[in-house]
Image (spheres, rainbow, N blue to C red):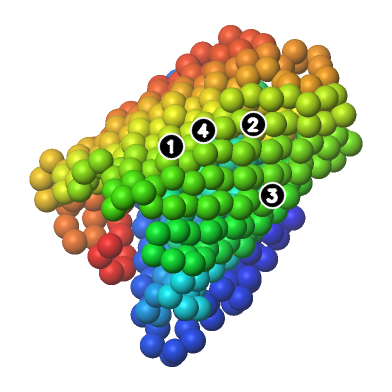
Amino acid sequence: MRGRRPFLALLGSAAAIVPLAGASGQVTTIPSLTASVGGAYSTNPFLTVDGEDSASVQLNVQPSLQLIDGADTALITANYNRADYLTRYGSNSGYGGSVSGTTRPNARTTLGISASYDSQVLGAQNGFATPLNPILTSPVTGGSTTGTGVDVGTAPVVSTPIVTNPVLTTPGLPIVNGDVGLIGLRQRRNTLSAGLTGSYAPGPLSTWNAGVNVQRATYPGRNGNGEGLSLFASNFRSYGGNLGYNRSLTELSSVGFQLSGTYVDYDSGTQTQIYTPRVTYSRTLSELTTLNVAVGAGITHDEGGTFVSVAFDGTLCRNGERLRGCAIVSRVPSATGLGGVRVQTTLGANATYTISPNTSASASGNYVRVGAIQSDQAQVPVLGLGAQDYFTGDVSLQRRLGRMFSAVASVSYRTASGIGADIPGDITGRLGISVFLGQSR
């Protein structure tokens, strides 16, 4: 039960979020529940060195509650996934949730608050999830530049002209970010985060935005299967904030700047500061296509010295009636459970195509390269901590069977390298049924 206490506390904090959307008493409530169940076959489910193939029964449950009161909104979400393997691996589960809200005290000001909790085994194929609509998300505005992999993309956050540290996510494919080096150890990671954001428009052409956030990442020594090698991981806390400004050049383009800072405190005794000043540019290329770019520097400082690297991220997104998707490129300093900051480069793309009113297909690919440790302060020098690579690819198909039911199928491929051993790649196929209860979205 210890691992679930932060999750229960997170759900309890929803009481502080809901009033954001209920001041006038005219609140629209939108509950929903998506549940998927099916079977899967994986050649290496946990990307372990001695991985073996196994079939499994998989379950994913995702309830949500959205509250809308004019321009004010609140959202409460939860998720639970479970895979029961027929041979060798036993069972594996993951769970999490988020609460968030936005409010507009006046026409010029927007405020937001959010909190999230997530517990997953790194490198695991999560429980069966509808593999449609891969989405491009970013941390809470003003979020940390540590890239620790907290996905708050389902929560409404204060929008800014530039996507800060976007993360490409696909249901069923895990987010590992800086912790590529822990793949294959069946190491569980628990992350608890919270953030406050705000934006203010002094005039019709300019906007100021700011935010603060805090995060706690822990790596328990034993996961649900009695496995996990915590001696390779170091728990840490991070405290971050940012300040940004954006000004419109024309009706289609704008420029600005973003200053971000993060302090990372490892339980092992190491402290690191990360600063990322960047210039931002946004442009609407057409009615369906938008471009966001940020270019600057990633400055990392600890007891081992100061390290400077080029930092950038960019997104190109299309939101058409039948085809929608995004391409992403990103290079930012990233905190890792291995006890040091590393530069992470991400290349990704996703697309969803509506074949017919009842049939959709999607595909995504995501390549992550985590550079060598930047400091001699690493807590696990025995591993060498050289550059590491991680790749995921996914194709999927969904066919609506009625108002509530859909058949879903997907095939994914994952591989990791550079972590000190040859790891067989994983190919996973899934087939199952998804049910949606609630109002149409």
Estimate how packed mark 3 is, as few (under 14), some (14 to 19) or many (20 or more) residues with alpha carbons within 10 Å.
many
Spatial separation of the CA atoms under disc 4 and disc 3? 19 Å
Estimate the x, y position of residue 373 in percent, counting from the top left. Answer: 72, 20
* CB under 8 Å between discs 4 and 1: yes
Tell me the SS state at disc 3: strand
Counting residues from the N terminus, which is met first, the one under dot 4 or under dot 3? 3
Q: Decide if residue 308 is in sight here.
A: yes
Which numbered dot is residue 391?
A: none
Location of the C terminus by quadrant is bottom left
Which tag is nearer the camera, tag 1 or tag 3? 1
In this image, 55 relative to 242: left or right?
A: left
Q: Decide if residue 65 is in sight here.
A: no
Spatial separation of the CA atoms under disc 2 and disc 3? 14 Å
Q: Residue at x 52, y 39 (%)?
A: 279
Q: Which residue is mark 3?
A: 240
Spatial separation of the CA atoms under disc 4 and disc 1? 7 Å
Which numbered dot is residue 298?
A: 2
Estimate the x, y position of residue 317 in percent, counting from the top left. Answer: 31, 40
Estimate how packed mark 1 is, as few (under 14), some (14 to 19) or many (20 or more) residues with alpha carbons within 10 Å.
many
- Dot 2 amino acid type: Gly
Q: Which residue is mark 4?
A: 295
Q: Which residue is mark 1?
A: 293
Counting residues from the N terminus, which is met first, the one under dot 2 or under dot 3? 3
Spatial separation of the CA atoms under disc 1 and disc 3? 21 Å
On screen, residue 88 above or below 253: above
Estimate the x, y position of residue 11 in percent, counting from the top left. Answer: 60, 67
Counting residues from the N terminus, which is met first, the one under dot 1 or under dot 3? 3
Tell me the SS state at disc 2: strand
